[in-house]
Image (cartoon, rainbow, N blue to C red):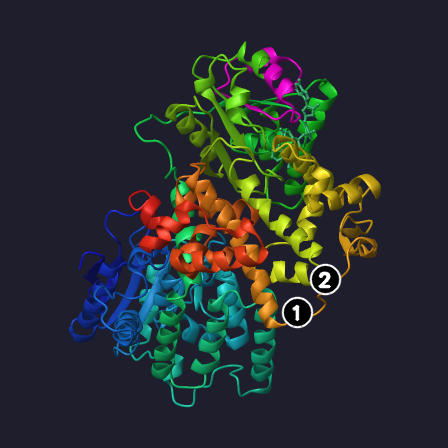
Amino acid sequence: MENFKIDVDGDGIALVTFDVPGRSMNTITGSVMRDLVQLTDTVKSDDKIKGVVITSGKASGFCAGADLGEMNQRGAGDASAPKSEEEKLKAQFEGSFTLNKTLRALETCGKPVAVALEGLALGGGLEIALACHYRVAADNPKIKFGLPEAKVGLLPGAGGTQRLPRLIGVQNAAMMILQGADKSPQEAKSLGFINEVVPAGTTVEAAKAWVKANPKAVAPWDVKGYKVKDHPFTPGGGMASVGGNAMVSKQTNLNYPAQRHILSCIYEGTQVPIDAALRIESRYFVKTANTPQAKGMIRSLFVSMQALSKGGNRPQGIPEYAVKKVAVIGAGLMGAGIAYVQAKAGIETVLLDVSQEAAEKGKAYSKRIVDKDVSRGKLTKEKGDELLARITPSTDYALIKGSDLVVEAVFESPALKAEVTKKAEAFLGETAVFGSNTSTLPITGLAEASVRPKNFIGIHFFSPVERMGLVELIRGKDTTDETVAKAIDYVLKIKKTPIIVNDFRGFYTSRCFGTYPAEGVEMLMEGIAPAIIENVGRQCGMPMGALEVSDSVGLDTALKIGKTNAELNQQDYKKDPRAAMLSWLVEDKGRVGRKGGKGYYEYGDDGKPTRIWPGLAEKIEVKTKECPPALKEELTKRFLFRQCIEVARCFEEGVITDPRDADVGSILAWGFAPYSGGCISYIDLFWGTKKFVEEADRLADKYGDRFRPNKLLRDMAAKNESFYERFGAKKAA
Ligand code: NAD
């Protein structure tokens, strides 16, 4: 066995050390599964072994669960040569049931098995531990135990949905599994799935002592008369099943099949003996793993996100850039947030504005966050002071000297940005990077003000900077690979996820994101009741209703963009009914959106929307007041297709080139239905390009050319090719 080492001591207790070679953390790979079968056979058949203690050879913890990277490539189960659909499912079931069968064999091997947990046990790692008769954990509140599979659209498939409810009751287990929540050793002990918590470094000793004292150990559910706490046929359990279903439906809008399958697994499995229960779990596991949601979520939310946050899209062969000092110009909303995340990451930060007062105000933003964290015990006063000491607010551009990078975040004006660029570059070294946080202005144009356009790049943050995980890096015409690599190193240092796009008005994120609120306005103008538009928007997985998004962005901003576009196309903007409507709202009615307290919505004193503005009725006659399922489906398609088609156009125009960037960007930047794995995965996995194009053509015939598939999509549909095949075969996860 390459992953487990067995040492039998004088008492016949086998210490099994789990240690996957060449990895910093144990995960469950195909090879580990094969070894577990052999380990179980050895434990059972070797007479010298009287009992077993399993532990980890890694300082990082016990085991982080299934190897999702491997699973992403393989799909559910190892069905490499599927024949019919039925045979494929059967092979997948057998593949996924193997681990359940093995762990059950270990549990019933007739010898006591304990596990000594000095570090984290998550997913399959915790499931191995749950299949042991006794669990000892080190007393360290930082250790996490949990079943996080639901977060990537899966369910625990190695007994977790069956053993956890049997140990801690149906209600507690359902909550923990549905939320993918983790628990500390003490919490786990009080819930009842850890038996003993002992000082760190003594778990093996304690586990051995238990094994010695309990030669005849069996699992609680193998003792006659065992009953699952609050199983569905108890009054509390019955209520919990009904309530649980309602809660999951409300929270997920039925977009996440894993959530419902988890409830079904627990409901069905806790009514039958464990062996049948494990088969039920394996069946639901295969069913869940085969959903496009699981495939999309594993790929984008886990594999790609991990790859990108390790520099997976960084140009190769360029040495790592040590970013120690960065100047931020403009201490407004964005600059203040950028200064905070930099200082938090240990970067010496110069924060410049036009007056000392404005610069200090920008720094005060960090102080507010730090004070809050200190008062909540999340940060020590000392560390907080250190963080703040890294930010130097000033008006003196000479302080830029020695900076590795500059982030410009002044007002969105090309002339001002040009002036600031020139002023800053006078103090900037030859190899330093100049980044502009512009949200719309083409980078190539801004770089004209630079003496070193090859070092010039767009570094587009999202608001609020400290909470938004994405940074969009925009290459200008002259931006070099070296500059991109350096900017990526900066983004990784401040612990954000970078995506790389090419220069275009609105770049990638602002351009595609705008199609969602725009479609909402189209629906409004067709006479669909605003409540239907907003509810369907949220129910199809978007974080807010489309009209609410328009209000958040600012109706005046949308009007300005509309006017600019009309000018570019030499049109009278008022001839466009959407622009006319915006002009009526903004110019006639003074409704600029959330920031002004009035837009499509009315707002309360707390800034939260209270209701749709009834005055809309002056302009719009509501014709559709009911939303039967067929209409909901149609509106859902309109919302999602519209965004995806814009993303496909971005690929055709070369604005974006890596499907991972497109998928992760769509989820992190504008919250595109996360269950889909992102816009590209929605096309690839939920439809396939062929069907997607057919459906988009139907929508275009009915609603207009904004839905018309581009040449690229048609080309791919003709070959039945996916985006990941065409654009990401080598690079993408
Ligand atoms: P803001 O109005 O809050 O801040 C701009 C700051 O720049 C002000 O404090 C101003 O005093 C300062 N400034 C002006 N001229 C200066 C100069 N010559 N030298 C130094 N400082 C100067 O604006 P913001 O919302 O922080 O936006 C800044 C940039 O970030 C814009 O280009 C904007 O498009 C972009 N952006 C904004 C958002 C957002 O959500 N607000 C998101 C992404 C990008």
Circle 2 packing at 10 Å, graded few (<14), some (14-19), many (20+), is some
Left or right of residue 184, residue 109 in this image: left
Residue contact at pointers 2 and 1, CB within 8 angstroms: yes
Q: Secondary structure at mark 1?
A: loop
Going from N to C along the chain, the mark reached first, 2 or 1, is 2
Query: Where is residue 98 shown, x and y percent of the image?
Result: 27, 71
The label number, if any, that marks residue 529 in the structure image: 2
Query: Where is residue 163 shown, x and y percent of the image?
Result: 41, 74
Q: For residue 14: magenta? A: no
The label number, if any, that marks residue 395 in the structure image: none
Circle 1 packing at 10 Å, graded few (<14), some (14-19), many (20+), is some
Q: Residue at x 54, y 44 (%)?
A: 512
Task: Give the CA separation, mark 2 to mark 1.
Answer: 9 Å
Q: Which residues are magenta?
A: 392-420
- As rendered, which of 376 and 516 lies closer to the eye? 516
Q: Residue at x 73, y 40 (%)?
A: 574
Q: For residue 410: magenta? A: yes
Query: Where is residue 12 shown, x and y percent of the image?
Result: 21, 69
Please say if 182 is above or below 262: above
Q: Three-letter amino acid code at disc 2?
A: Ala
- As rendered, which of 125 and 292 lies closer to the eye? 292
- As rendered, which of 230 and 426 lies closer to the eye? 426
In the displayed orientation, state which residue is furthest to the bottom. Answer: 225
Q: To which residue does mark 1 refer? A: 627
Location of the N terminus (image quadrant): bottom left
Left or right of residue 90, residue 637 in this image: right
Determine which quarter of the picture holds residue 382.
top right
Residue 252 in view here: no
Determine which quarter of the picture holds residue 618.
bottom right
